[in-house]
Image (cartoon, grey):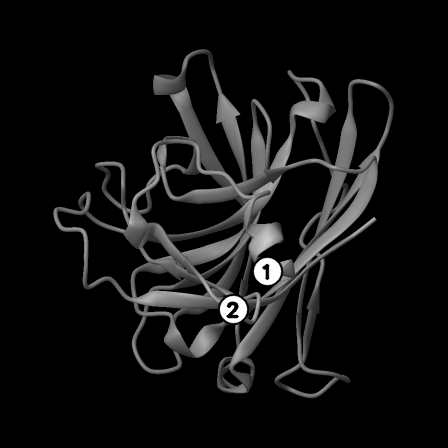
Amino acid sequence: HAAADEKLHWQWPANPQDHFARFNKDGSISLSLLNTAAATGFPLLWQSANVLTQKIRAENFTFSASFDISALPPGARTGIVFMGDDYASLALERTGENTGGYSLVYFESESAGGDDERSETVKARLPLPPQAVQAGRLQLSLTFTKCDERRGSVSFTAACGRGSGAGCINWQPQAEPYVTKNAHWVGGRFGLYALRAGQADAAASGFPQISVSDICIKS
């Protein structure tokens, strides 16, 4: 029942389709790798229908989730995001075959006006060593802290393994936390996504899925 109750807090930015995700009894979520917006390269999160988010329920909180690296195909990106009128995200991206081409990317949205003028800029990138890929799972976290009645700050972290070995990662991509703007922080949302580069999807089945487990919200 706990997993079913938690599902009620999730929402999509557009009319959801059954193939967007599967909510499992163990509390994990299987996200389909989709491109719901016609684009070359990765579609913008702002224009993607398959971004799964929750509204802020506490003034200060940490949101974390564990992603299955092994199932990520080339040309895919999956991660966590904090969204308001603007947004920031930490994601795992794969562009190569075998154990190559994996990297962590931190990016922020930029807007010169309307939605058609919105873009995403990668602020930091960290190639993953083969040992980290072979570990199988990667934990991504964001911590939200209320600054005042209109602003909040968001810090991202990626972790894999324990200790300081070749396959261990503890990465904080930001020199300074991301500060929300252009909207009251209470209207902010945080969540998950799984995107595929290329043209928009023409079918509604047969897409690979990414398993996201150990989903935790602590306030």
Residue for badge 2: 25
Q: Residue furthest front?
A: 1
User: Which residue is located at x 43 percent, y 32 percent?
Assistant: 13
**Residue 83 circle label:** none
Q: Farthest residue to the top: give it.
A: 113
Residue at (73% x, 41% y) in the render: 154
Query: Left or right: 143 with respect to 52?
Result: right
x and y, in percent, of residue 47 in the image: 36, 31
- Report the front residue among 7 and 165: 7
**Percent position (x, y) of residue 168?**
67, 81
Image-based side of 183 in relation to 29, left or right: right
Residue 179 image-quadrant placement: top right
On the picture, is 192 further left or further right than 38?
Answer: right
Task: Reply above or below: 164 against 169.
Answer: below
Numbered marks: total: 2
Q: Which quadrant of the figure contains the N terminus? A: bottom right
Of residues 193 and 134, the one drawn nearer to the viewer in this rendering:
193
Does residue 72 lie above or below 120 as drawn?
below
In the depicted view, which residue is nearer to us: 7 or 134? 7
Q: Residue at x 21, y 49 (%)?
A: 198
Q: Residues within 10 Å of mark 1 (few under 14, many from 20)?
A: few
Q: Secondary structure at mark 1?
A: helix
**Amino acid type of the residue that numbered disc 2 sits on in the rendered structure:** Lys
Quick one: label 1 or label 2, which is nearer the N terminus?
1
Which label was assigned to residue 3? Answer: 1
Question: What amino acid is labelled 1 in the image?
Answer: Ala
The Cα–Cα distance between marks 1 and 2, rounded to whole angstroms, is: 6 Å
Residue 207 in the image: x percent, y percent?
24, 62
Q: Are marks 1 and 2 in contact (CB under 8 Å)?
A: yes
SS state under label 2: loop
